[in-house]
Image (spheres, rainbow, N blue to C red):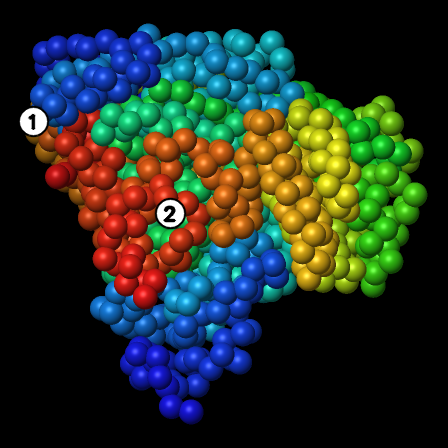
Amino acid sequence: MAGVARGAGEPRMTATVVAADVASIAERVREARATAVPLRIGAGAHWLDAGRPCTAETRLDLGGLTGIVSYEPGDLTLTARAATPLSEIERVTAGEGQWLTLDPHGSADGTIGATIATASAGPLASAYGTPRDHVLGCEFVTGAGDVVRAGGRVVKNVAGFDLVRLVTGSWGALGALTEMTVRLRARPEVDRTLFVRVGGKSQDAIATAAWRWVREGDYRPLAAELLSPSLARRLGGDGDAQLLVRLGGNAAFVRAAADSVASVGEMQDGAVDAWRNLGVSERSGSMVFRASALPAQCGALFAHVASFADAHGGYAHATLARGIVRCVIPPSDDARAISEMQAWLTSLVSTATVIGERLPHALWPSVSRASDSQALAETVRRSFDPDRVMNPGILGAP
Amino acid sequence: MPLTHPLAARLASIVGARRVLERPAELRSYESDGLPGYQCTPSLAVFPGTREETIQVVRALAETHTAFVARGAGTGLSGGALADDVVLLGLHRLKRIISLDGDNARALVEPGVVNSTLTAAASVYGLHYAPDPSSQSACTIGGNVAENAGGPHCLKYGVTLNHVLALTVLLPSGEVVHLGNPEGEADGLDLLGAFIGSEGCFGVVLDATIKLERNPISVRTLLADFSSVDAAAHAVSAIIAAGIVPAALEMMDHAVIQIVEASIYAAGYPTDAAAILLIEVDGPGAGLDDDVARVSNLCTAAGARGVRVATEPADRARLWQGRKKAAGALGRISANLVVQDAVVPRTKLPAVLADIHRICAAYRVNVCNVFHAGDGNLHPNIGYDASDADESARVHAAMSDIMHACIEAGGTITGEHGVGLDKLPYMDALFNENTLTAMCTLRAAFDPERRANPAKVVPVHSCREWLASPVARASRA
């Protein structure tokens, strides 16, 4: 979600404070504590506009924290300030035949800080994992106004308690991320994208055949997304559900993997742009959520979610290797449509894990889950942000 | 002999008198872990046999504000499982594999399940548990979670963190919480990620949902033979930079080769080599031979005298035996051993290895290196005689200089063994006060009384408020 469009029903921002270096961020946070005026962290100005119930009305603008601090191609590590766009990291690392294998949904001006703070991931997570698998170290300003440098710049590190994993995906609720060191990968020798029309009589059968190829076949793709028919059409396919596959490796591997995927359906080469288009294909203000279950249930889950999406003018795609189905529904102000979706989500929550990406305020309660670790999470949050000045409300109640 | 520890009778009523030890002679078995340089005797040891007994024991400890140390197989290499006059909570009897799900490639296990036992059980589905520390035939999943354990194959497959989907955790207060999500994506604060690698300071694992890996279709193990350590280190950098991710990329220097080849674990390594690399490449058949050829060429270009490729399982197993049992072979020649675990950026390997040799020559101590080169994770080992005070002092001074050299090179003090007691003195050199305080803050959320594995991981002086607390004084009393 590093770059989503603005959602509806946001609290109006009444003020913006700008901080372009770590010391002044710490100063702004301490001021926020002293004056009891909570902050809403933002850099690219997108990432909090997900409808998450954040109640702060003063924006802490970190947009000035840009730039790559260091890049060691031989170590496959890079350190950047939080507001550095992913596109800049992509440009700089491409020169060395490397890449940061994080491709969250959203426009290319999404920042590294937002990606890490929201733990946003895209199709490449199938092969390379999510932000928690990429961040080696980070600097953040806690809600107490302290500057903490966690982790390091090496690829393996168990020194001390893992503050890096703690702040990754914490939505700024423990503090503001200011700098991070990430692990890079070498780009594959061959990078090939294929559209595969998977054979099958029903959506469920198609999904199951595609899932088997991804999970049980001999060749692990870099990414494999099963697209509902309407999404396949948008991305240049024809009317059926299609499997969008990205194969990477040496030439012999990619050739053999392509032969193997041909066994599940008719295929044609696609452009690598298909992946970028997948990331930005939703209309501004769309409702977006992800449903997940045990991997073996992914086919049935996809069929269920995709038919709901189709019926509401939306679409769905499944990250088969991870058992996740992402659903996009066009924006609606119609109270009846919202209430129908509310009922449907409530029933879905009883059989799958549902995580909101961008939802109207009214729908957030439908996807919140009770957990016996909630009190512990709240204690952790209070320990790092004693006066609740960092993105209050963003992780839900209280 | 009647039980005399104030808690002994109560704990015996939960687990049975046979499962509570308090005689000094019995407790001596638990005075060390895999690093025999440290000895601490617990005040009492208790061994629950079920999840329910474990919960009752921890609740009894909570009610009496008693400090404790959880212990699995005691194979750790940082002194982390040592109980210094506090209660030792042994979890090795909780060894049930509760369920194995081949379709979804996951397992639900109790904390005392041995690492290689899980792999053996999963093999019927063509699956395995990827983290493979050298102690895998003895170490437990609970201990692996506590230390965020690695092993040679984590270069490609990731460490414990990447293979644990969910945990049921018993907090030191006796409360049971679920972290992560065994059936889908996890949301909210990553408390699972924070717990893994918390070295027993955040609580006790009651069960773990494990993500299993599929067994590779084809595997090749390469043995590359070098006439200088520097050339071997440059080969490592070249392989990583070329974008090949071997399943494992290990280095052993001349001293280790000599010791291994003179032991029952002899693997057929070239005894005149200055260093060897053990490189494993796996995947489907297609493309694998191309990767093998490329790795082989990169080694030759870096100066390898020869590269041997093992394909047959028996040949491969023999090559790995020497690596996996190297620590055991080292134990044969010295009464005491210090093992370090620093990680440096991979481009700094040649320079840091040269530093290590220079430092050890200056202190007149014998170092040997066997380590995970692909990750930059060094394991310099120095054997010595602890009864020789002068030699001991020189060994510890050399290790301290090595650690500081690694930190200066942009590295860290531990990649997989944990801080425990052993690396506590270096935490201040690695992290500033704010960061150490933040670690204390996080720990306090899980264990406000700091009773679980006290005085480990973060130096006590970083937690000033703890020093002043009545609980801290009571736990030392």
Which of these two is toward me, B206 or A70? A70
Q: Which residue is mark 1?
A: A335
Residue drawn where x is 37% and y is 33% of the image: B433
Q: Secondary structure at mark 1?
A: helix
Q: Amino acid at mark 1?
A: Ala
Residue drawn where x is 35% and y is 20% of the image: A178
Quadrant housing residue B380: top right
Let me know if residue A197 appears in the view: no
Return the chain for callout 2. Answer: B
Quadrant housing residue A317: top left
Numbered marks: total: 2
Which of label 2 and label 1 is nearer to you? Answer: 2
Q: Amino acid at mark 2?
A: Val
Residue B460 marker? 2
Return the chain for callout 1. Answer: A
Q: Residue furthest front?
A: B390
Q: Residues within 10 Å of mark 2 (few under 14, many from 20)?
A: some
Residue drawn where x is 39% and y is 10% of the image: A66
